[in-house]
Image: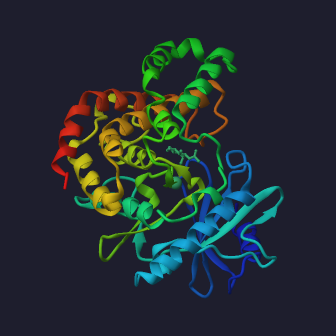
Amino acid sequence: MNLTELSKLCTYFSINGSLASYTVFTSGNINQTYAVTMDDGERYLLQQINTNVFRNPHALMINIVSITQFLAKKIAQQGGDPARETLTVIPAKSGGNYITTNDCCWRMYRFIERATAYDSVEHEGLLREVGRAFGIFQNQLADFPAATLEETIPFFHHTQKRYEVFCRAVESDAVGRAASVAEEIAVLHAYSDRAAIITDGLADGSIPCRVTHNDTKLNNIMVDDETGKGICVIDLDTVMSGSLLYDFGDSVRFAANVAAEDERELDRISLSLTRYEEFLQGFLEGIGPSITERERELLPMSVFILTYELALRFMTDYLNGDTYFKLNYPEHNLVRTRAQLRLAQDIDRKLSAMQAIGEKYRT
Ligand code: GN1
Ligand code: MG
């Protein structure tokens, strides 16, 4: 996309002024994101929705609008600032909440100024804030009518189904890569007995079904530059009903790993128990007393399961010929798989230490 193309796209949305400049965001693995600055100084996020991943952008945008409107009302009632504490969707001039042009779907959000989405843990205390923000998000949505949400990606965190999809990818071996990654495949099979722990709990009612974010990476929280508080949860594409264990596990998987999600040097990868404790503390503060005993018990295991699940997803994509995740280089999905597997092994060794930390925060 160049300035002229982006400038034209901006004219479709209900905003003033014309495009003065833009920057490209590179951190997401799915959507294409631009920060656009208009000649009146206002900034917006302009995002192309990846319709290969999100097959029903219409339903997706209805989910996002109803969630953000619900949150805006609640934030205002609680004396907060909805413009900074939740996303604001900019309507299209033609009506609706997104536009379609040349077979591509685009949407626009108000840019949250003076706040940062961190790609790595840059200072002490950050994880507690991030944990708290995700906990509060769940709390605020506790009385949202979950049944009205469309399932934008069916079985998104259904680890057992992810395992089955992986098995099929191994079998069909679409691009002839399976033999070269036999070792990684064997490790992925070896952990499969843990795949159904959360989904079985949801199915038999021993784990409550809640509205969940489902993509709780560190960079999906905006942190206020001045106060250091986690103020806004972003990237709401995968908000659906599920288990809080999805959100907790996925967030810790990303943020408590002292190395990058796609680190090549496997010996650098390790789950920091200090970071685990920080995040846990914030999350428990944010979610409050509604967390159940069974959920608490499974917090450490959820970190393992979500890490294992992502390893399955990266490997499946590698075996399928890289059709889902954006790549920075040809072997990226394989590097990501190895990194997540190494992390899963490290988490496995630390499960009882994580459980012991949890005991400290019982009230
Ligand atoms: C994708 O694009 P991003 O970074 O927000 C993916 C998540 C993965 C993550 C791994 C819709 O999220 O599930 O955990 O990459 N989102 C989707 O980095 O598949
Ligand atoms: Mg994201």
Q: Position of residue 16 (x, y in %)?
A: 68, 86
Q: Is residue 14 above or below residue 323?
A: below
Kindly identify the residue that appears in the image at 53 percent across and 40 percent down: 157
Query: Relative to residue 68, is residue 359 drawn left or right?
Result: left
Query: Relative to residue 159, is residue 342 drawn left or right?
Result: left
Q: Position of residue 255 (x, y in %)?
A: 35, 48
Kindly identify the residue that appears in the image at 39 percent across and 43 percent down: 249
Q: Where does the C terminus fall, quadrant-wise? A: bottom left
The residue lying toward the viewer, choosing from 149 and 219, is 149
Q: Position of residue 358 (x, y in %)?
A: 22, 45
Say whether residue 335 is visible. no
Say whether residue 359 is visible. yes
Specify the farthest residue to the left.
Answer: 360
Q: Where does the N terminus fall, quadrant-wise? A: bottom right
Kindly identify the residue that appears in the image at 23 percent across and 38 percent down: 355
Q: Is residue 40 above or below residue 171?
A: below
Q: Quadrant of residue 115?
A: bottom left
Kindly identify the residue that appears in the image at 52 percent across and 79 percent down: 73
Query: Relative to residue 87, is residue 305 drawn left or right?
Result: left
Specify the farthest residue to the front.
Answer: 205
Q: Position of residue 55 (x, y in %)?
A: 73, 48
The residue lying toward the viewer, choosing from 16 and 264, is 16
Q: Is residue 38 above or below residue 337?
A: below
The residue lying toward the viewer, choosing from 135 and 253, is 135
